[in-house]
Every structure is written in structure tokens, then in C-alpha cells.
Amino acid sequence: MTKTVEELARILHGTVEGDGSIPIHDVTTLELAQAGHLSFLANARYAPQAQHTKASAVLVPAQVHTPATQIIVGNPYYAFTQALVLFHGHRQHKQVGVSPQASIDPSATMGEGCNIHDRVTLSEGVTLARRCTLYPGVFLGPGVTLGEGCVLYPNVTVYENCRLGNRVTIHANSTIGQDGLGYSTEAGVHYKIPHIARAILEDDVELGANTCVERGSLQDTVVGAGSKIGSQVVIGHGVQVGAHCMIVAQTGIAGSTRLGHHCVLAGQVGIGGHIEIGNHVTVAAKSGVNQSIPDGQRVFGYPAFEMEKAVEAYSAIKRLPELRRHVRELEKRLRSLEASSRK
Amino acid sequence: MTKTVEELARILHGTVEGDGSIPIHDVTTLELAQAGHLSFLANARYAPQAQHTKASAVLVPAQVHTPATQIIVGNPYYAFTQALVLFHGHRQHKQVGVSPQASIDPSATMGEGCNIHDRVTLSEGVTLARRCTLYPGVFLGPGVTLGEGCVLYPNVTVYENCRLGNRVTIHANSTIGQDGLGYSTEAGVHYKIPHIARAILEDDVELGANTCVERGSLQDTVVGAGSKIGSQVVIGHGVQVGAHCMIVAQTGIAGSTRLGHHCVLAGQVGIGGHIEIGNHVTVAAKSGVNQSIPDGQRVFGYPAFEMEKAVEAYSAIKRLPELRRHVRELEKRLRSLEASSRK
Amino acid sequence: MTKTVEELARILHGTVEGDGSIPIHDVTTLELAQAGHLSFLANARYAPQAQHTKASAVLVPAQVHTPATQIIVGNPYYAFTQALVLFHGHRQHKQVGVSPQASIDPSATMGEGCNIHDRVTLSEGVTLARRCTLYPGVFLGPGVTLGEGCVLYPNVTVYENCRLGNRVTIHANSTIGQDGLGYSTEAGVHYKIPHIARAILEDDVELGANTCVERGSLQDTVVGAGSKIGSQVVIGHGVQVGAHCMIVAQTGIAGSTRLGHHCVLAGQVGIGGHIEIGNHVTVAAKSGVNQSIPDGQRVFGYPAFEMEKAVEAYSAIKRLPELRRHVRELEKRLRSLEASSRK
């Protein structure tokens, strides 16, 4: 497929600065781009690359220094995403129908257009809506229900009674609805607490690979509509994640905590149990959150506090030995003043 | 099932404050409870909820302010667990017998009452005691032995010669007995060290989902009886975890380290290699432990040290910029004193 | 098998101190060793054990205090590895040929001597070179290519078009080539960015269990030849890891970051996105790296900086409350001096 810069600008609601007649046949990074490519500048860090790119056109938020024709758009990263989808589309799933090598309980039901690969297990009472794709090794426990257009990659396991909304995507080797680490301890022995609630993933949730969403003990674990979760994340039992959150790889949220909507948790973040995180909260990578956070706050640190203060405080750690030497030196000078004042 | 408060109190060894004749038909949280429900107050944080609960009865450690009838017990969380088991039981596993779609080596043996689902692999020399349940996709390598009543959820993989005691439970997509990251480096190339020892999980161990217990290179990796481990934990090669430990999600223990019994490692903790952690040690969430810890100590921090001191020290980080400003101000005042004393 | 100390010393290029005629039949740790065992001293921490070992011979870098015969070698840990391989070999894979219970697309091709276990999936266009072993539950998506002698343990999933070099080993339940957490956000909704590039593992890479290597969005994710990666690691989309790196368990590297060769990332390290890590860089356990690091540097901390400075700075955190008290005391003394100077 080929489109001129002009045509692309129209589709992407942008305005052209430069030659709009150039034909574009693909999209890529500033660094990898060649003639005929559209690229984008979404991160100021890469501005120098815009000056040297071989791309024929670049999506930019405002005019920049570049040899390429510029398409000025409000949100270059989003426009680039649209262009990438235009040229490449999303992953297509082969239409395989229902494999005779799947294990399907007679009580399981499914809508039209589902792809059930070899070696999928649908236990009793499983319900799939239309056009779900389940790759080999997927296991759905008793009573699991999936909405339309869900895609579960190989070896994803969903325990009994869990519920996935429409268009939920789960990458390989992830686990949904296992019991959380719930025990009560009496006389030094840990007694298992039954987990009778479910894990629920609402519409348009996507989970990375090897990620875990525990079922609740008494209260359902919920991941809100449109939230996107990376690889190797653990969502603890009874946690409620609001809509449109972004949770980066290797983050963990402990039991019964509630997150608002549009939160961003960067990589390797830990959120303690039984706390309340507001809406639009941002937690910097590797931070540890041990108390509730109000709406809109950005935090960093271990334990985490307001981002700007935390950045200053943590950079002061570096100069802590120097500060200690400074204090010792002040004391010496003070002692000498004290001595002379006693004379 | 319905029981009166009085009947429950007898079963749970508690004493009733209030109307003991009320019928109870389920157990849940203070917040979710309605008439006919039993709830519990185990965490002081939820005391305000006890004042407003709609539960008919509440398990408490001592009389509190609540409209519900109270059942006073020594350990409300344990009593609640018993009540939850009473009303709901533990997960039941369907009796499926031995699937003809499992791959069972002729040399594998199993006790009566095992459930071997479709697509389980039992390699040569595998031995299962009675009443084990292996879900689809479980792989047991050569020579693996399981005690009675083990439950392995879908896609759990156990490498050769590993040994699981009685009533071991492993959640989906976990891996037992893979090689650790063991190499010796010569002239910049990493040479693999064979891992000839095993991973051993003693009786009543439960592991979360996507958790890894590496086999030992020369010395077995051991998880002691009754220890409970969350999701996405890594137990390194040659590590020895004592009995009745509780290890929360995303924690990692590096090679050859030994933990005593009844230790608690909170979430995302890292324990360095080749160190000794005593009995009854508690490590706060996200801490990094790089030296041995004596019995009974509670630690926090990165690197971790005594909990109370660490909490004070880490909260002082927040005020570090202020401390630096304070020191600069003292120096200014000192300089002015020095100047006037020289006059 | 039995070899005399003398024979072993010749094989391992060492020199004998003591009785070289003693027969050795196995290798193990100083602590576990008995008569007839060869052991090694590679970590000074274990020097006291060398004094009390029952081993008949010990590999050492220089003469030490021990009752055992000593074999002095340049690199005892490497020599021990060679001896362990000599006595035990590496894991052998049963020759099972190609299982009729595997799902093999007619367009898939494979070299001679491959072991394709039950329930492996080879999608359209998969290409395997000679002597690959794929355990049950392995899934290779369309167009995946593997070099010679690869070993993929149970339930490893490799997404479409990814490429593995020769002798790549991947432990159970790992995922290669899933999409990264790539979305552009417009009006509060996250739009998925297609991931059209691949994940590439070069020759002799070994990955632990439950580890994830994301595919690139526009640029391939690459793990360089000879690099070894532990369990539960996440290599983000578009990351480039150089050759002969060692990446310990639970580490994560965020998108588009580049690592040089011979880097060591200890356990639970986090590396931010879009940065450049030089060659021979060492990052201490649990550190968080948020900026580029030049060749050869060793770093520690959160955020990480030069190792020696960071060790001093982080140990000063412990004495921060004391420092604050000291500063307050100095102020008091200063105030009293100021008062007397005003008289």
C-alpha cells in the first residue's frame, strides 16, 4: 500500500509542512527510516534524530528542524499508531474453527466464529461469546465466561467462575483466578482461607505474558475496562483496578487495595494492601507505596511520596556522606569558637 | 446451611455477646455483609466498618462498638477461616480418573483415586501416591515423586527427580526444578554448571501461580513443611526455606541462602545469596537483605536493617533536602560568629 | 568413574599440592564432601569450610589451609565446572523422534534428530534445524525459526516470526515474542500499537523459567550470543542486550534500552527505557537505573550511581536520624554562642 503525505495528513487530521505529494509505503522509527517512510517525533529525547532522519515525512507536534516533510498533529504518537495500523493492521488469527483435539465439556457453549485450537480445555459450564480465539494449552475452569472477541494466547489458565468482558486479550502463560496467599495462622500453622470470589477482567483489558490476577477470597478482584497490564504483574486478591489504567511489567498490588481510573504504575512498582489510590495517580518505577494517595498525585520513592520532593530527596542521598563530613567540620569549627569564647 | 450464632460460637470456641439465636447462613466482610451474615474484625484498620456493618454477627478479639452480635474469640481471623470452610468448603476437584489423553510412561506408578486430566505427562519412573490431581498440561519429568493428595494446576512443570511431599498444592504455570543461573566464566564466556541436585517441597507446601523453585546444583533446594509461597516468587538453587514460612508474591531468594522456620517475607523482597536468615524473621515489603539476620529480627530497607530504626531512617530521607538547607544555614551563622570573634 | 587427583589435575591444567594418587569419584561442596570427593574454594567466604572439609581434594586459586590435597588452578570455579561435567555430564534428552500427538503444520520443516514431544505445536512456516528438542506444550507460532540443538522445556511459547540461534535453551513456561505494553493514549483511551518486529535470541543464549522476551514494535528485540538470563526476567520491546551478559532473576529492562556486552545485572534490577548501558557494566541487586552508564562502571542504588559511593551513601541512611539529632544539637550550641556574643 502507498499513500501520499497529503492523503495521510487527511486521514490523521494533520497539516502538511513541505512536499505533500511524496509517496509513503511504510512507518518506522526516525533512526531506521529510509525514503518512502513516515516516522514520528513524540519524545523530545529523539529531536536530534529528526535532524538526521532519512524518513520522507515525520509526524510532529509542532514544526521542528528536520529535512523531512512534516505532518503537524496534536498527538504524534497516536497518529503514528493509526498509521502503523493502516499499513500493517493488527495480528490476524487463523480461522481454525473448533479443534477435535480440544477437550470440550458437553455443557460448554460458544458463539459463532470461535477458534478453539488443539488442546484447549473448556470445563463444564464455560460460556464463550462470538469470535473468541483460544490458542493451544488454554485452560478454562468450570463456569468461566468470556465476552466477544477475546484472545487467549497459549497456556493461559483461567480458574473457575472468572469472567472476562469483550475483547479481552491475555498473553501466553498468564494465570487468572488462582487463590491468593490467604491463610490465617494459629499456633504457628497456616490455615488456608477458601477463595470463593472471582477475578473479573472488564472490556478491552489486555494482559502481558506470565501475569497473574488472583481471585478474591470474599470480594471479587476486578480490572476495569480499558486497563492495560504488562508482563509478570501480580494483581492481588480482592484488588480493584479502575478503568484505563496502565500497569507496567513486574508491578505487584497487594490484597484489597483499590486503584482509581487512569492510574499509571511504572515498572516494578509495589503497592501495599488495604489502601486507596485515587484517580489519575502516577507512581514512578520501582516505587513502594504503603499509604493511600489522593487523586492526581505523582509519587516516587521507597516508601513513595510526592514526585518532585522525592526526586530532590533521593538525589540528596548521593551527597549524604559529604553532608556528614560537612556537619563534622561545622562541629569542629563550633568547638573552636566555644573554646575561644570560654577564655 | 444455617447455624445460629450460638452454634457457631460453640464450634469456634467463642463466647457470645448479644443475641445468640440469630440464624447465620454465610460469612463475608464487614462491608459486604447483610442480615444473616457472620463477619470478622481482625485488622484494627477496619474498626470503623464494624460500627456500620449490616452483619448479624461479628467475630472479634474483644468487645467492640458494633450493632452486630459479637462472638469473642482468641484469633478472629482463624475463627473466620474455620467458619468460611464450614459454609463453603475448599475447592472440590472433579473425579476424572486417568485420561486416555494423558501421556503416561509404562514405568510410572500411581496410587488409587488419582485424577490425571487430559494432556498430562508422566515421564519414566514417576511415582504418585494416592488421590493426586494433575490438571491439563502438567508435566512431570523422569523420576519425579509426589506424596498423597497433591494438586497441580494447569501447565505446572516439574523437572526430573524432584520430590513433593503430601498435600502439596502448586498453582498454574509454576515451574519446579529448572536449572538455576549457574555458570562459571572463563575468558569472558559463561560455561554451564550441571544441576545434579533436586528441588524438594515438603508436606503441605502451597505455591502460587507462575512461581519458580530452582533445582540445586550440588545441594537440594528445599521448601520446608507447611510453608506457603505466593505468585511469581523465585526460590534460587540450593536455597533452604524452613518450615511454616510465608513468602509473599514477587519475592526472590538467591542461591544457597538458608531461612529458618516461621519467617515472613513480604512482597517483592530480595534476599541475597549465601546468607543465613534465622527463625521467626520478618522482612518488610520490597526490602533487600544482603547479610545474615538473627532469630526473631524484623527488618526493612534497601539494604535492610532493624525495622524500627529503618522506619525512622527512611522517613528522614523525606526531610533530607530540609536538613541540607539547615546545615547550610548553620554554617552561615557560624561564619558570621567566626568573623565577629576575629574582630 | 574414578580418576586420581593427578589425572584430574592434568585434565584441569592444575598443579597438585599433596598426595596425587588419591582416587576421586565425584565432585561436591566443601560441606557435603566425603572421602573420594573433589571440592572447590571459589568464594573466600567459604575458606573456613576448607579447613574442616572431608573432601579428598580441593580446587584452589592458591595454597590454603586444608587437610585435603590441593589442586591449584587459575580459576577454581571453572575447573570445578569442568570436573562436574566430566563426572555427571549435562542433562540428556530422551530420543523420542516426532510424536504423532504433536500438531505440525504441513509447511513446517525440521532437520534430522529432532525430538518433538506430544502436544507440541509447530505452526505454518516453522523451521527447525537439526537436533532440537521441544518438550510437551511448546508452542511455536507462524514463521518461527530455530537453529541447531535448541532445547525448549515444557509450555514455552514463541510468537510468530521470532528467531532463535543455535543451542538456545529456554526453561519451562517462558514466553518469547509477546507484544510489549505499547499503547498511545488519546482522550484517556489507550490504543494498541502493532508489534511488527521480532524477538531474536542469538547462539548459546539460555533463559530461565517463566521469563519473558517481548517482541519489538518497530525494531527487533535482541539478546546477544552467549548471554544467560535467569528466571522471571522481562526483556522489554526493542531492547538490545549485547553478547555474554548475565542477567539474574526478576530483573526487568524497559523498552528500547541497549546493553553492551559482558554486563552483569544482579537480581531484581530495573533498567529504565531508552537508555544506553555500556560494555562490562555491573549493576548490583535491586538497583534502579534511570540513566545511561559508561563502559566498565559498577553501580548500585535507587536511583543507581557509582558502586563505592553508593555503598557509602546508602550505609549513611542508617545513621540519618543520628545526623539529624547531631545537627539539632549543633544548632543549640550555636544559639548559645550567638546569645553570649550578643551580650
Image: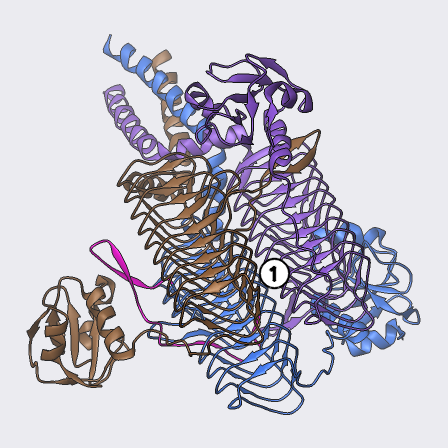
Chain colours: A brown, B purple, C blue
Q: Is residue C200 magenta?
A: yes
Kind of residue indicated by mark 1: Pro
Q: Residue placed at 46% from the left, 32% from the top?
A: B313
| Vertical comparison of B315 with A177: above or below | above
Position of B120 with respect to A141 (left or right) is right
| Secondary structure category for the residue under label 1 | loop
Magenta stretch in the rendered image: C181-206
Depth check: give the residue in front, B160 or A338.
Answer: B160
What chain does mark 1 sit on? B
| Vertical comparison of B225 with C139: above or below | above
Residue C158 position, x and y percent, is: 50, 74
Q: Is residue A161 magenta?
A: no
Q: Which residue is mark 1?
A: B154
Q: Is residue B212 visible?
A: yes
Position of B241 with respect to C310 (left or right) is right
Residue A114 position, x and y percent, is: 43, 71
Depth check: give the residue in front, A4 or B14.
Answer: B14
Question: Which picture quadrant has residue B15?
Answer: top right
| Vertical comparison of B101 with A241: above or below | below
